[in-house]
Amino acid sequence: MRRIANPLAASIAGAALVTIAATIYLMHGMAAGPGADLGSFSWFVLTWVVMMAAMMLPSVAPMAMTFALVTAQRSAKGQAAFVPTWIFIAGYFAAWTAYGIAAYGIDHLIRWWNPAFLAWNHGGPWIAGASVALAGLYQLTPIKRRCLAHCRSPLHFFLEDWREGPLGAWQMGLHHGFFCVACCWGLMLLLFAVGVMSLFWMSAIAVLIFAEKVFGAGPRLATVFGVAILALGVWIAVAPGTVPGLTPPACLMEMPGMPGMKMPCA
């Protein structure tokens, strides 16, 4: 089994490093604070998929490796044909892509509505703080605990929901991905609230997700994170200028050669 596990682990680690480098390149110079313009649909989807790969590949690695081991064992016993693990991973990221597209649609609907109270010098900090606080409260709910337990139990998942063939692998990846979305949508809401194009917040949230899913104390850490995020939401609402890593919205200008994307004015 090491012949499968070691190369797969190396491949996932390599892909994570590549997508981290690509994310840094794609986000260079972009507005990184609350209310950052998401740009054109095609550019956002490209950036979102690369960013999700950078953030989520480390935490989905245990599930992907379990899938690879199970399908290899079944293939060796003649119970089923071997299915490449990338099909499972593709299904997983399809769920996160759907989340990103939905978030993009909601963002553009809000921009079209353009309510004055969302301006940062009006009610912006309170809206951002409330969104972050909501993410913190979700961390403390039973549905969060249930979805996290699912994400932390790869063998149980495959024993209960195994499906044969490439289509079955994609469906299992999609199924697991939607459980992961249900588990972590609040943390991603936090990312949108404080600046979806911020490398600082992206890295911080990726660490939280990895700790919840992989560490033995993950369920307890999720509760601790929830309380901390709730406090962060209050802090942003009351004194946003004192929050480390929070970049207030500033004057924006069009990025050369990237229609729809904005960066801070010089």
Image: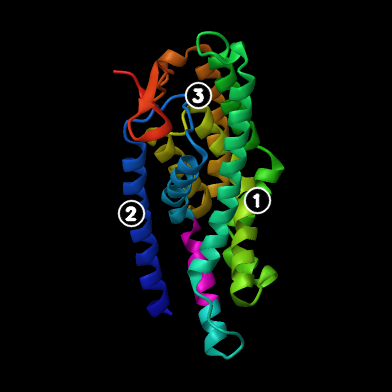
Q: Secondary structure at mark 1?
A: helix
Element under disc 3: loop
Question: In which quadrant will I find the N terminus?
Answer: bottom left
Disc 1: CA contacts within 10 A as few (<14), some (14-19) or many (>=20) = some
**Considering only order in the chain, which callout, 2 or 1, is on the residue closer to the N terminus?**
2
Q: Residue at x 31, y 42 (%)?
A: 25
| Labels 2 and 3 touching (C-beta < 8 A) | no
Name the image quarter holding residue 188: top right
- Note whether residue 224 is visible: no
Q: Secondary structure at mark 2?
A: helix
Residue bearing the label numbered 3: 35
Q: Which residue is mark 1?
A: 147
Q: Is residue 17 above or below residue 113?
A: below
User: How far apart are labels 3 and 1 at the CA level?
Assistant: 29 Å
Which amino acid lies under the numbered mark 2 shown in the image of this protein? Val
Q: Amino acid at mark 3?
A: Gly
Q: Residue furthest left?
A: 266
Expressed as whole percent of the image width and height from the top left, the position of residue 179 reads 64, 53
Q: Residue furthest top?
A: 122
Residue at 49% across, 70% down: 85
The location of residue 141, given as percent across then percent down, is 68, 39
Residue 200 painted magenta: no
Residue at horizontal 39 percent and vertical 16 percent from the top: 251
Q: Magenta part of the protein: which range? A: 60-70
Residue 224, compared with residue 90, is above or below; it is above
Q: Earlier in the sequence, mark 2 or mark 3?
A: 2
